[in-house]
Image (tube, rainbow, N blue to C red):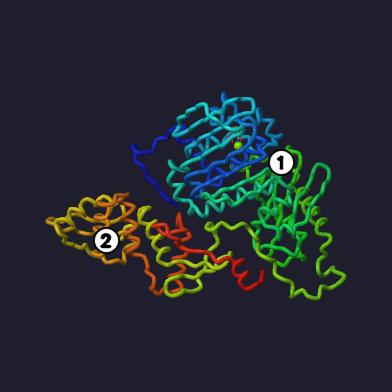
Amino acid sequence: MVERSYSFNDIPAIQVLSPEVAARIAAGEVIERPASVVKELIENALDAGATAIQVEVREGGFTFIRVADNGHGIPRDQLPLALARFATNKIRTAEDLSRVRTLGFRGEALPSIAAVARVEILTRTAGEIEGTRLIAEEGRQIVQPAASPVGTAVTVRDLFYNTPARRRFLKSPLREAERIRETVHRYALGYPHVAFRLIIDGREVLIAPPGTPLERAAAIWGREVADELIPVSWEAADLRIHGLISRPTLGRASRAFQHFYVNGRPIRSGLLAVALERPYAGRLPAGRYPLAILHIDLPPAFVDVNVHPQKAEVRFSQERSVYWGISQAVEAALAPFPRPEEATIAWPFEEAQPAPRPLAEPSVEYGRPSRWRAVGQLLQSYILAQSEDGLIVVDQHAAHEQVLFERLWAGDAIHPLPSPLVLSFSAREAEQLEAELETLRSLGFDLEPFGGNAFVVRALPASLAEQPVPALLNVVLEEAAALRRGGGDPRERIAMRLACTAAVKAGDGLSLAEMQALLDALQETWSPATCPHGRPAWFLLSREEIERRFLRR
Ligand code: ADP
Ligand code: MG
C-alpha cells in the first residue's frame, strides 16, 4: 500500500475542472485514436442517409481526416449546435433510447472530436441554395457561407494536438492507417448499398461501388474469398439473422474476418463468435476460424446499446435466444457440408487438398502492419525480408538513415559521454558552431563554449552514441556552411546529414539480429517508404509477381 502523509497546508484542494479540461478528458472515452474519429464520422454519414461516403486520411489520420458524404446535410442555423455537447437530432426523450435505430444518439462525437482537434464542417441541405462552413478551433467557432454540394464533409486536422500524452501513447501512423482501413472495411461490409472510397496518403486503397453483399465482400476480400462464401438467412419471431459465412473449406488463423452487426451497428463480441463457430466444429480444422458478415436484426427494445463509450458492445435482453438463433442459422447454412464423421462417402484425398489461399486483399504498398522477417543479406547492402505479401528488399543504408533521422528529428534520448570531451576549432569554425548551438541542443547534443575556440561536449543524441564526436561535429560544420549558401531548415538539414553519417553503409555486413532490429525500427517510423532525401528505402516483390515468373499463374 502506498502511504501518503500531508501536512494540513498542502492537502490538494478539490476543484471543479474547467469545461475545456473536462471535455478533453471525456473525449478520451469516445475518441481513443484516429480510427475512432473515422468510425464516428462514418456513422454520422450513414445516419444522414448517405449513399456515398469518401474517407481520406494522411499520416495515420494524425494530421488529416476527411469524411465526405452525400447525406441530408445540416441546415445553417443548426450547424453550431452540432458541436454542442449532448446535442443530437436523433433522440429527444429518455424513452427514445429504447427505440434508437440510428448509429449515433448521444450527441457526443462531434464535440469530443472538436475538443482534441481542429474541425471544419462544410455542408448544405437540398433546401438551401448556398452551403455553410463552420471552423472550430480551440473553443472558437466561425460560421460563414460557402459553396458546397448537398451533403456534409467533416475535416479533422492535428488530432490530439492539445493532448500530447495520448499522441505519444499511440503507435506509428502505419498502424493507425491500418486500423482506419479495418474500420472502413467493417462499415463497407455492413452497408453494401452505400458506395465507399478510401484514400490513404493520396493513394486510393478502396473503391467499392454500391452492390450486393457478395459483390461488396468481393470488393474488400477479393473474388477468390467471395467465391467461398455462402448465404445465411434465418428468421424466428422477432429475430432475423442474415449475411454471409465461409464454407468449411476456407478458414483463417484469427477472428479478424468475422463481422457482426446488431441492427446495423458493428459489434465486438466473443460470445457471438462462439455461437458462429459452434456449427463449424468437426468441419473446420481446430485453430482455424470461419469468416462471417452476419446481421442480427431484432426490435431495438431488446438491445441496450448504451453500455459502452464507443457503442461497440451491446447487451441483449434475450441473450440466450440470440446465441441460439445464430447457431441455428449457421447450422442450417452449413447443412450441405456434412462433418467428416457423418459423411456417407469418405473423401479420399483429404491430405492432398490445397491449403486455403491467402486473402487477395488490396495491398497498400506501404502500410502492412504484419512484421517483416529478415531472411538474409544480399551483396552486403540489401536486407531480404519475408512478409505476408512476398519478398521485401530493403536498402540498408536508406532504411537506417530514415530511422535515425526520425529519431533525431523527434527529439532523441540523450546519451551522456563517460567523460566530457574538450575539442578545439579554428576561429571561423567556432563561430559557425556557436551559431548552430541551439539546433544542436534541440537534437540532443550537450555542447558548450569552453573558452577560446574550444567546446566541451558532455552528451550526444542516443542514436549517435557510437560515433566519434569530432567526425560528427565536422559534419555539422560542413552542413552549416552549405546551409549558409543554400538555405533550408537548419535543424532538418543537420539531422539529415548526421543520420546519413551514422547509418550503416552499403558493404557493411549485418547479423540476422541486426537486420531484424532495423526492419522493426523501420516499420515503426512515420514515413518508412523513403530515406530522408526521398529515395525509396525498400520495394516489394509480390507473391503474384514471383508466381508469374515461375509460370504458376
Ligand atoms: P449523434 O450522432 O450522437 O447525434 P454527433 O456529435 O455525432 O452526435 O452529431 C451531432 C449532430 O450533428 C447529429 O445529431 C446530426 O444532427 C448532425 N450531424 C453530424 N454529422 C452529420 C452528417 N454527416 N450529416 C448530417 N448531419 C450530421
Ligand atoms: Mg454521431
User: Residue 475's quadrant in the figure?
Assistant: bottom left
Q: Residues within 10 Å of mark 1 (few under 14, many from 20)?
A: many
Q: Residue 542: horizontal and vertical position, in percent?
A: 58, 65
* Closer-to-camera residue (254/53): 53
Relative placement, left or right, of 217 versus 203 is right
> Residue at (77%, 49%) from the top-left corner?
242
Determine the residue located farthest toward the left in the rendered image. Answer: 452
Relative placement, left or right, of 265 versus 119 is right
**Image disc number at residue 477:** none
* Closer-to-camera residue (10/303): 303
The quarter of the rendered structure image containing the C terminus is: bottom right
Relative placement, left or right, of 295 versus 132 is right
Locate ligand 1 by image quadrant. Answer: top right
Q: Amino acid at mark 1?
A: Val
Determine whether the residue tagged by mark 1 lies in a helix, strand or loop: strand
* Closer-to-camera residue (348/473): 473
> Residue at (59%, 33%) from the top-left corner?
149
Q: CA distance from mark 1 to mark 2?
A: 66 Å
Residue annotated with mark 1? 303
* Closer-to-camera residue (552/170): 552
- Tell me if label 1 and label 2 are in contact, CB under 8 Å: no
> Residue at (48%, 46%) from the top-left corner?
62
Q: Residue 94: horizontal and vertical position, in percent?
A: 66, 30
**Numbered disc in front, either 1 or 2:** 2
Sequence-wise first label, 1 or 2: 1
Q: Residue 364: horizontal and vertical position, in percent?
A: 56, 56
Up-down: is 459 above or below 552?
A: above
- Does the residue tagged 2 have its C-beta within 8 Å of any atom of ligand 1? no
Q: Amino acid at mark 2?
A: Val
Relative placement, left or right, of 458 versus 324 is left
Residue annotated with mark 2? 475
Q: Residue 435: horizontal and vertical position, in percent?
A: 22, 50
